[in-house]
Image: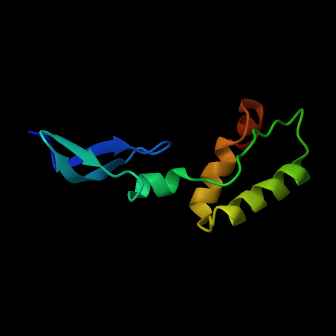
């Protein structure tokens, strides 16, 4: 017997995410990912490039990062901080920490 829900992991998250099963076909169940939070979270506009102290211009990177936040409706400071830190190369990350 298949479970009512399937637990998956969101990309970049340490928290489990449950995808609800939607209907049964014979002995197999089909689930809809389109209606899940995971699918909504995975759709982004644009992409973040890596910031390198040696090769990147901070003012250009900052402007692009701000536009990425606007395009993807990211308003929470904690998420913005995590995305900024995640987009730094190792040398830039060492400067911050």
Query: Which residue corresponds to the image point at 48% horizontal and 57% vertical from the top-left?
Result: 40
Color style of the picture: rainbow
Q: Number of marks in the image?
A: 0
**Vertical placement of residue 95 versus 33, above or below:** above
Q: Is residue 59 left or right of residue 39?
A: right
Query: Which residue corresponds to the image point at 43% horizontal and 52% vertical from the top-left?
Result: 38
Query: Which residue corresponds to the image point at 39% horizontal and 59% vertical from the top-left?
Result: 35
Q: Is residue 68 left or right of residue 4?
A: right
Can you say which quadrant of the picture contains the C terminus?
A: top right
Q: Where does residue 73 sit, x and y in percent of width and height? A: 63, 67
**Vertical placement of residue 78 versus 9, above or below:** below
Query: In front: 81, or 12?
Result: 12
Direction front: furthest residue: 26
Q: Is residue 82 left or right of residue 55?
A: left
Direction left: furthest residue: 1
Can you say which quadrant of the picture contains the N terminus?
A: top left
**Vertical placement of residue 61 versus 2, above or below:** below
Q: Where does residue 14 sit, x and y in percent of width and height? A: 41, 44
Query: In front: 72, or 94?
Result: 72
Query: In front: 38, or 29?
Result: 29
Q: Where does residue 33 sit, x and y in percent of width and height? A: 38, 51
């Amino acid at each position: 017997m298949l479970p009512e829900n399937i637990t998956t992991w969101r990309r970049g998250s340490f928290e489990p995410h449950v995808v609800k099963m939607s209907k049964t076909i014979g002995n197999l169940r089909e689930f809809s990912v389109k209606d899940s939070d995971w699918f909504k979270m995975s759709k982004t506009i644009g992409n973040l490039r890596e910031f390198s102290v040696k090769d990147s211009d901070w003012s250009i990177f900052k402007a692009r990062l701000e536009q990425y936040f606007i395009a993807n409706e990211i308003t929470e400071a904690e998420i913005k901080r995590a995305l900024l830190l995640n987009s730094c190369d190792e040398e830039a990350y060492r400067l911050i920490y």
